[in-house]
Amino acid sequence: MAKTTASDIIKLAVSQIGVKESPANSNNVKYNTAYYGREVYGDIAYPWCMVFIWWLFYASSASSLFYDGGRCAGCTTFMKWAKKQTGRWKLKDFRPGDIVLYDFDGNKNDSDHCGIVESVTKNGVVAIEGNTSEAGSQSNGGMVCRKTRPNTVILGVYRPAYKTETTTGTVGTIVNNEGGFDLAKLKTLKQGDKGAQVKALQTLLIGYGYSIYGGADGDFGSYTAGALKKYQQKKLLTTDGICGPQSWASLLGL
């Protein structure tokens, strides 16, 4: 059974933003070194956007969630495999943690690039991607970046069999005698607060598809406030970034 959650993979991916190959245009980068077992060089032979995805699972001791535990460095090869995995190739309703495959050249039979979905937008996804750039080449740019991509370039996503994220030990322990949640024991949370209930709030927001930089770390910062505001706006709640009884009730489905 998988022990790694989507949040675990996203948190690791976010921590890699800014990593570059060195020297430029060499494909010499730590992800390739781990994959091939040695330093490699070559603009044609060793593109590493899919290797970056492989590395995220490898470094998380979760290789079984990627390509049946095997190794894959090619986007098209991975996509062909993913399409054969019953129930795991998705063309819509994307989620954080999905491995997303892109088409930039109009040939939908092959995939030009890939990333790990951090959050879902109205018209696409925000993803952490290896071997891209802030500007210029998007499929061989030599850097780990956060990119916003529209649905029009998404071929589909593969959804790994992550461990289900729960709030056990946080919200899950705050119950009344009938086994339901006791809102009276849930604090009103705001930016600057810390602790188990903040972690529970963050876990719930991530579960609804809202991205929080750093994941569910129990620290109510600006990213948590921003995610909460987006949730409140969508649910037609008071959009103030404060989690009070009304927001708690909505998040918990009460």
Image (spheres, helix red, strand yellow):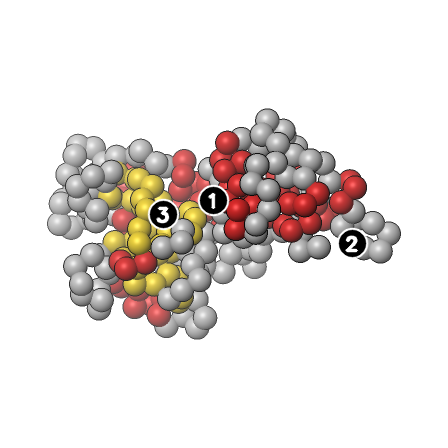
Amino acid identity at mark 2: Gly
Of residues 152 and 25, the one nearer the viewer is: 152
The N terminus sits in image quarter: bottom right
Q: Residue at the far top: name it.
A: 192
Mark 1 surroundings within 10 Å by alpha-carbon count, few (fewer than 14), some (14 through 19), many (20 or more): many
Foreground residue among 141 and 93: 93
Q: Which residue is mark 3?
A: 127
- Residue 177 image point, x, y percent: 86, 52
Residue tagged 2 = 180
Residue furthest out toward the right: 177
Q: Could you tell me the amino acid type at mark 3?
A: Ala
**What residue type is disc 1 on?**
Ser
Q: Earlier in the sequence, mark 2 or mark 3?
A: 3
Q: Gap in Å between the C-alphas at discs 2 and 3?
A: 36 Å
- Secondary structure at badge 3 equals strand
As measured in the structure, the alpha-carbon distance from the residue carrying label 1 to the one carrying label 3 is 10 Å
Mark 2 and mark 3 residues within 8 Å of each other at the beta carbon: no
**Residue 67 visible at all:** no
Tags 1 and 2 touching, CB below 8 Å? no
Expressed as whole percent of the image width and height from the top left, the position of residue 224 reads: 53, 37
The residue tagged with tag 2: helix, strand or loop? Answer: loop
Circles 1 and 3, Cβ within 8 Å, touching? The answer is no
Is 173 or 78 nearer to us in this picture? 173
In this rendering, does residue 241 appear at all? yes
Residue count near mark 3 (Cα–Cα under 10 Å), binned few <14, some 14–19, many ≥20:
many
C-alpha distance separating marks 1 and 2: 27 Å
Which residue corresponds to the image point at 73% horizontal and 40% vertical from the top-left?
186
Mark 1 lies on residue: 211
Marks 2, 3: nearer the viewer? 2
Q: Residue at coordinates 36% horizontally, 47% vertically from top-left?
A: 127
**SS of the residue at dot 1?**
loop
